[in-house]
Amino acid sequence: MSKMKGDKSKNPKVAGKRDPQQELEAQQWIEAVTGMRFPPGVPYEDVLRDGVLLCTLMNRLSPGIISKINTSGGDYKMMDNLSQFQKACTRYGVPDVDLFQTTDLWDKKNIALVTQNIFAIGRTAYKHPEWRGPWLGPRPSEENKREFSEQQLRAGEAIIGLQAGQNRGATQAGQNFGASRKIILGK
């Protein structure tokens, strides 16, 4: 059976990014931090779509980081929640590269990026000593600075790598690549 371009469920390049296991971990972490449960039977992205739960998550991690969460109103108010959430993530220390765009969640364009953003918040929480857990994902690595003596630094200068052109007498002499250039005068 051939794959149709418009069928997202069978096209691994479109649907393959989402990882149900990661989404479940993110959901369980959000529930543990906020104390709020996802309604049974409602898809993950639909629960997060209005931004209320995400804003609540940020306020639990850093109290008062979002001053007002819109719980009612039209689509504009709910999209404003997502915008406030993204600003709060930046203030909390989440790298810009891990943030999703409002349309990624609102229009359900890239739910995998939303999950990546939640994991990035979990990693960033390790850097906040005031947060005592629960945690999401592995602890990020920390700086491992090394000091070398002058003698150790000089020892590397005596080694000639293969990039320097020494390869047991082998040269590129006599090799031609491609067609040679012919110049015809008088035309």
Image (tube, rainbow, N blue to C red):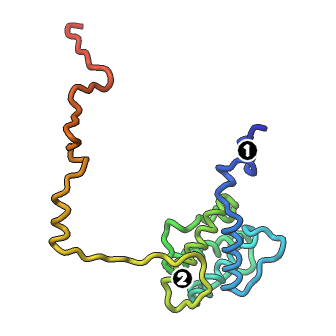
Q: Residue furthest right?
A: 41
Q: What residue sits right under mark 2 in the picture?
A: 125
Mark 2 or 1: the one toward you: 2
Residue 121 image point, x, y percent: 56, 76
Q: Say which residue appears at 26% left-offset and 27% top-offset.
A: 175
Q: What residue sits right under mark 1 in the picture?
A: 6
Q: Label 2 amino acid?
A: Ala
Q: Say which residue appears at 63% left-offset and 72% top-offset.
A: 82
Q: Say which of 117 and 26 sits in front.
A: 26
Q: Say which of 143 and 39 sits in front.
A: 143
Q: Label 1 amino acid?
A: Gly
Above-or-below relation of 116 to 178: below
**Label 1 neighbour load within 10 Å: few <14, some 14-19, many 20+:** few
Q: Say which residue appears at 77% left-offset and 81% top-offset.
A: 37
Q: Nearer the N terminus, badge 2 or badge 1?
A: 1
Q: Which mark is residue 61?
A: none
Q: Say which of 185 and 4 sits in front.
A: 4
Above-or-below relation of 138 to 155: below
Q: In which quarter of the image is residue 146?
A: bottom left
The local secondary structure at tag 1 comes to loop
Q: In which quarter of the image is residue 41?
A: bottom right
In the picture provided, is 63 more to the left or to the right than 149? right
| Marker count (numbered) | 2
Whole-number angstrom distance, CA of label 2 to CA of label 1: 39 Å
The N terminus - image quarter: top right
Can residue 67 be seen by looking at this rendering? no
The C terminus - image quarter: top left
Above-or-below relation of 165 to 110: above
Residue 56 image point, x, y percent: 66, 83
Q: In which quarter of the image is residue 176?
A: top left
Q: Say which of 142 and 65 sits in front.
A: 142
In the picture provided, is 160 more to the left or to the right than 111? left
